[in-house]
């Protein structure tokens, strides 16, 4: 039954057969997939598994951890630490990089992950996910934090799992973005969505509008124009979505287009955005770009940013190319004082009249 279907292992062997130790990359991604299956089983049990709810601890970002955050983190570590494929691991839920225990060989890759993205949604049974990024570590030395701080353009693989009505794995090794669906009966990921392509145009945007009073003028301008619909600047109606689970938003965008924004805002000056660069923004940006979309901070291509800290936050604007380019243009026009409808030089970045004054 179903002979001839492309499983994840077959697909990876085919995509990575050409060069040197890339077989190790395929093996690592298969180990990641094993962790994903374990996390999928835990999330699918819901309240029956006893895994829901928070625990009495906080991660390095000061967020209260959910039981499932910790269990998903442990599943990723246990599945990947032993095989001689990784030199080290880093995670949203671990303050410092994880040191591979003595006795396990070290390999050529660094694996960075958000074990459970959107975990505020676990208790309400809305889709959550796992995000991961793979970088090279071409040294026999034990990796230090600085070794992890490579720009997104250096990623050799990236992906996410989404635990929705179906569990899917979406990944890229730099040759397009491809989606696999978990066949729960036989336990295999099957290639169901090869060569994903994001439409260049869209009429759907996603942003948490409860933060509107903290947005910068270019974001205000964009959202206001979308909301004006047919009657406004854009001449067509837009639809809005907000799931509060980035993997679910990104998955929708990969399936039918759209734009997702968690922009820079003035809510907390110590946080230039909500999402984390190394294990949320960069891997998702690679998947989006490999599917023909664009990913930006509003001011520059996301994957070209030089990371400074493992847990640093960044503004994220990604999805259908023409919308992302438009939002980048609005940022540039604002910076130079040439934005409309805020077309007075009084309202540019150097002026007294900043975002808050618009609200
Ligand atoms: P995490 O659960 O890993 O901390 O990430 C949650 C992120 C992301 O998935 C989502 O887009 C965003 O936080 C939701 O933010 P709001 O709470 O502002 O809606
Ligand atoms: Mn997350
Ligand atoms: Mn998380």
Image (tube, rainbow, N blue to C red):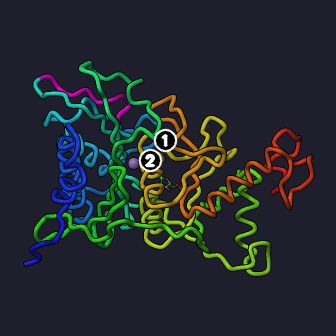
In this rendering, position of residue 244 left or right of residue 210: left
Specify few, some or many for label 2: CA neighbours under 10 Å numbering under 14, 14-19, or 20 or more.
many
- Residue 350, disc: none
Residue at label 2?
Answer: 280
In the image, what residue occupies the spot 38% across and 26% down?
Answer: 147
**2 and 1 marks in contact (CB < 8 Å):** yes
How far apart marks 2 and 1 lie (CA) works out to: 6 Å
Residue 89 versus residue 74 in the image, above or below: above
In the image, what residue occupies the spot 68% across and 52% down?
Answer: 328
Specify few, some or many for label 1: CA neighbours under 10 Å numbering under 14, 14-19, or 20 or more.
many
Task: Tell whether circle 2 marks a residue whose Cβ is less than 8 angstroms from ligand 2.
Answer: yes
In this rendering, position of residue 247 left or right of residue 37: right
> What percent of the width, then of the height, locates residue 103?
10, 24
Q: What range is drawn magenta here?
A: 94-102
Residue at label 1?
Answer: 277
Residue 99 is one of the magenta-drawn residues: yes
Residue 287 versus residue 78 in the image, above or below: below
Residue 233 is one of the magenta-drawn residues: no
């Amino acid at each position: 039954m179903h002979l001839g279907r492309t499983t994840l292992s077959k697909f990876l062997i085919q995509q990575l057969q050409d060069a040197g130790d890339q077989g190790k990359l395929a093996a690592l991604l298969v180990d990641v997939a094993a962790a994903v299956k374990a996390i999928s089983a835990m999330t699918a049990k819901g309240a029956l598994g006893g895994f829901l709810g928070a625990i009495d601890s906080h991660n390095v970002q000061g967020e209260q951890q959910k039981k499932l955050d910790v269990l998903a983190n442990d599943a990723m570590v246990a599945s990947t630490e032993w095989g001689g494929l990784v030199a080290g691991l880093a995670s949203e839920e671990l303050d410092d990089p994880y040191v591979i225990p003595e006795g396990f060989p070290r390999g050529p890759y660094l694996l960075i992950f958000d074990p459970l993205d959107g975990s505020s949604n676990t208790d309400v049974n809305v889709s959550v996910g796992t995000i991961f990024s793979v970088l090279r570590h071409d040294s026999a030395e034990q990796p230090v934090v600085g070794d992890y701080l490579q720009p997104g353009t250096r990623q050799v693989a990236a992906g996410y799992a989404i635990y929705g009505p179906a569990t899917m794995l979406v990944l890229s090794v730099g040759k397009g973005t491809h989606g696999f669906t978990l066949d729960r009966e036989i336990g295999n990921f099957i290639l169901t969505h090869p060569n994903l392509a994001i439409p260049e145009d869209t009429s759907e945007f996603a942003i948490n509008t409860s933060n509107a009073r903290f947005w910068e003028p270019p974001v205000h301008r964009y959202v206001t124009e979308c909301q004006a619909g047919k009657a406004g600047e854009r001449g067509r109606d837009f639809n809005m979505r907000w799931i509060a689970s980035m993997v679910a938003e990104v998955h929708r965008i990969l399936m039918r287009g759209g734009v997702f924004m968690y922009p820079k805002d003035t809510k907390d000056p110590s946080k230039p955005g909500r999402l984390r660069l190394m294990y949320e923004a960069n891997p998702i940006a690679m998947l989006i770009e490999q599917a023909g979309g664009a990913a930006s901070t509003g001011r520059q291509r996301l994957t070209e940013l030089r990371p400074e800290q493992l847990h640093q936050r960044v503004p994220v604007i990604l999805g259908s190319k023409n919308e992302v380019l438009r939002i980048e243009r609005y940022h540039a026009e604002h910076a130079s004082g040439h934005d409309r409808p805020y077309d007075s030089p009084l309202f540019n970045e150097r002026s007294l009249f900043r975002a808050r004054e618009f609200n």
